[in-house]
Amino acid sequence: MPVDFSGTWNLVSNDNFEGYMVALGIDFATRKIAKMLKPQKVIKQDGDSFHVHTTSSFRDYLLEFKVGEEFEEDNKGLDNRKCKSLVTWENDKLVCVQTGEKKNRGWTHWLEGDDLHLELRCENQVCRQVFKRA
Ligand code: YOG
């Protein structure tokens, strides 16, 4: 049985989100609001097909993809830079490479005990987020 990330997840920790946002070029005022947020992730997984909805009181972001199929990502409401994204399995980790203007951009999701982990990378910055089931 492959890993199943499906569920509703609440953010409980968010390490170096500030550094990640600075690397993405997010302006000061937006960062000030964004770092107060406690986003929720609603993940629907059907095998290799994913629907990841990150919601907050400020902005929402919906990502839909199939593992192994490259797609155009617009990052609308985030940094708004377009990139080409590819998500693959690395054992039980879901790894996304976001190729575009920003070097070393991507993220990794995995499950650890009852927690959902997300590492967000951009240039030399790594943000580590942990979510718990709602
Ligand atoms: O997750 O791509 O689960 O897409 C990253 C925010 C803050 C807006 C959130 C809104 C990067 C202002 C999505 C926060 C900072 C700051 C809630 C992370 C950019 C702008 C939407 C992400 C993947 C993997 C799925």
Image: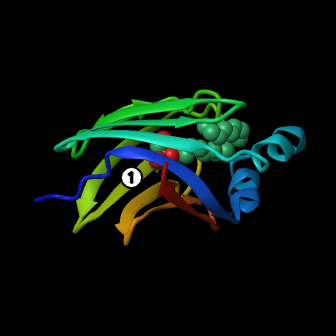
Residue at x 47% of width, y 30% of height: 62
Instruction: Tell me where residue 115 appears, x and y as whole percent.
Output: 44, 64
Q: Is mark 1 within 8 Å of ligand 1?
A: yes
Q: Is residue 105 left or right of residue 95?
A: right
Q: How many marks?
A: 1
Residue at x 26% of width, y 54% of height: 88
Corner quadrant of residue 65: top left
How would you rate the neighbour count of disc 1 (Cα within 10 Å): few for under 14, some for 14-19, many for 20 or more?
many
Most extreme residue toward the right is 29
Q: Is residue 130 left or right of residue 32?
A: left
Residue position for label 1: 96
Most extreme residue toward the left is 1
Residue 6 visible here: yes
Residue at x 22% of width, y 58% of height: 3
Residue 101 visible here: no
In terms of image quarters, where does ligand 1 lie? top right
Instruction: Tell me where residue 17 appears, x and y as whole percent.
Output: 70, 58
Instruction: Tell me where residue 42 appears, x and y as whole percent.
Output: 44, 39
Q: Secondary structure at mark 1?
A: strand
